[in-house]
Image (cartoon, rainbow, N blue to C red):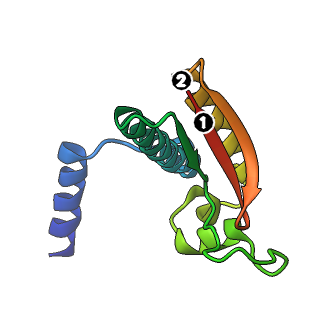
Amino acid sequence: MNLFIIILLMNCVYLFGEKIYKQQLRGMYEEELSKILLEEFTTTIVSIQNKIIERAKSGINEYQFTIMCKKRNEPRNCDYYDGHKEWLQKNPFSILSISKTYTTREEIITSIIDVVQDIFPDANITKSYNNCCDYYQIEW
C-alpha cells in the first residue's frame, strides 16, 4: 500500500508539478519582499494621485499628505510620540514590518515623492513637520 501511495505521489509531481531548484527556493524570500514593496508603493502612489486629481476637479490647487506616518490628532509635544512608529504598529504587513533590513522608510518615501514629481512635473512639492509627522504639500 505504501509503495502505491509513493508511486501515485511521484506521478502527481511529474504530471502537475514543475521542478523547483534550491536556487529558486533561496531567491523566493527576496522575490516576495519585492512583490510586497511594489504593491505597497503602487497603492500609495495611486492613492496620492487620485486625491490630487479629485482636488483639482474640485477647483483646489493644493494637497497635503503624509507617507507612512500616523499624525497625532491634538498638536502636542512629539517627544513621546513617533508618528512613523505608530503607523508601523497599525500596518503589520508593511514591508518595513516584515523586513527591517530590506529597505528603509526614507528610501521608500524619497521614491514615492520622486514618482509624484514625475507624474506632476510642473507642480511644487514642499516638506514640513506637523502633528509629529512629515507632511508633503503639492501645489499646482
Left or right: residue 82 versus residue 74 is right
Residue 131 appears in view = yes
Quadrant position of residue 88: bottom right
Report the quarter where the C terminus lies: top right
Q: Which mark is residue 18?
A: none
Query: Where does residue 12 sit, x and y in percent of width and height?
Result: 18, 53
Name the residue beneath numbered marker 2.
120
Looking at the image, which residue is at 63% across and 62% down? 69
Query: Where does residue 125 sit, x and y in percent of width and height?
Result: 67, 33
Q: Which of marks 2 and 1 precedes in the sequence?
A: 2
Q: Measured along the vertical axis of the image, is residue 119 above or below residue 139?
A: above
The single residue placed furthest to the bottom in the displayed view is 80
The amino acid at mark 1 is Ile
The amino acid at mark 2 is Phe
Left or right: residue 9 versus residue 44 is left
Closest to the observer: 77 or 99? 77
Query: Where does residue 120 sit, x and y in percent of width and height?
Result: 53, 23
Asked if the residue under mark 2 is in contact with the one under mark 1, i.e. CB atoms within 8 Å, the reply is yes
Q: Measured along the vertical axis of the image, is residue 112 above or below residue 106?
A: above
Quadrant position of residue 77: bottom right
Name the residue beneath numbered marker 1.
138
Crowdedness of circle 1 by 10 Å Cα count: few (<14), some, many (20+)?
Answer: many
Quadrant position of residue 99: bottom right
The single residue placed furthest to the right in the displayed view is 79
Q: Secondary structure at mark 2?
A: loop
